[in-house]
Amino acid sequence: MASKHVAYEIERLYGTLHDLDALLRARYGGADTSLWTHDALIESWTIHVRNMMHFLRATKPQPDDVLARDFFTGAEWQKLLPRRPRDDAEKHIDRRIDKEIVHLTYARTKATPETKSWQMSAITTKVGAELQIFLNHVPMDRVEPNFHRRTLDALRTSYARVADPGAR
């Protein structure tokens, strides 16, 4: 049952990025697009990217957190995932999401348009590479029957847009 929620998160991560891309293309094409929708899509993306970062590389997991390693036996997931420490960029993303999205803080008052920009393509590409490792190796009998189709469709339909760092 947990794999349905993992698939949902992956679909929403890439779906919000896809919809934001479409909204920006419409705006650049001269359409009067909604600022509210733009901001809601960014907020949605931050929630789902944070969930996937935690799913893949939890630093302080709670007992009831669904984690990638739960779908594997023993230390199998740790062997598949490239060994690297959680880097400064990931810590920075987490901190920004916490201070700018999840909580109402004074840090928001100091944000400028330049500092409010998210490197969504680069971040999603990095998370997506590790999600691909998960999808390539997760045992079929540990996920719902439609899991691979749903998640691969989400990755496939958005990968071309995400891979273009000039898009954002």
Image: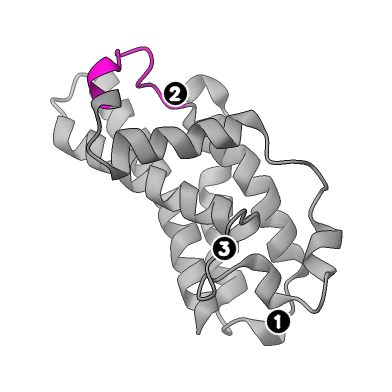
Q: Earlier in the sequence, mark 3 or mark 1?
A: 3
Residue 22 or 40: which is nearer the viewer?
40
Q: Is residue 34 visible?
A: no
Indicate the position of residue 159 as horizontal and vertical percent values: 58, 43
For residue 168, which numbered disc appears in the image? 2
In the image, 109 versus 38, the foreground residue is 109
Kind of residue at disc 3: Pro
The picture places residue 52, in percent across and down from the top left corner, at 54, 55
- Amino acid identity at mark 1: Met
Dot label at residue 51: none
Specify the segment rendered in magenta: 108-118
Q: Quadrant of residue 9?
A: bottom left
Q: Position of residue 167 (x, y in %)?
A: 47, 24
Element on which disc 1 rests: helix
Spatial CA span between label 2 and label 1: 35 Å
* Residue wearing tag 3: 61
Snapshot quadrant of residue 146:
bottom right
Residue name at image x 69 percent, y 64 percent: 135
User: Please, what is the dominant secondary structure of the magenta stretch?
Assistant: loop
Numbered label attached to residue 140: 1
Which residue is painted at 27% across and 42% down in the image? 103
The front one of 161 and 129 is 129
Q: Quadrant of residue 58?
A: bottom right
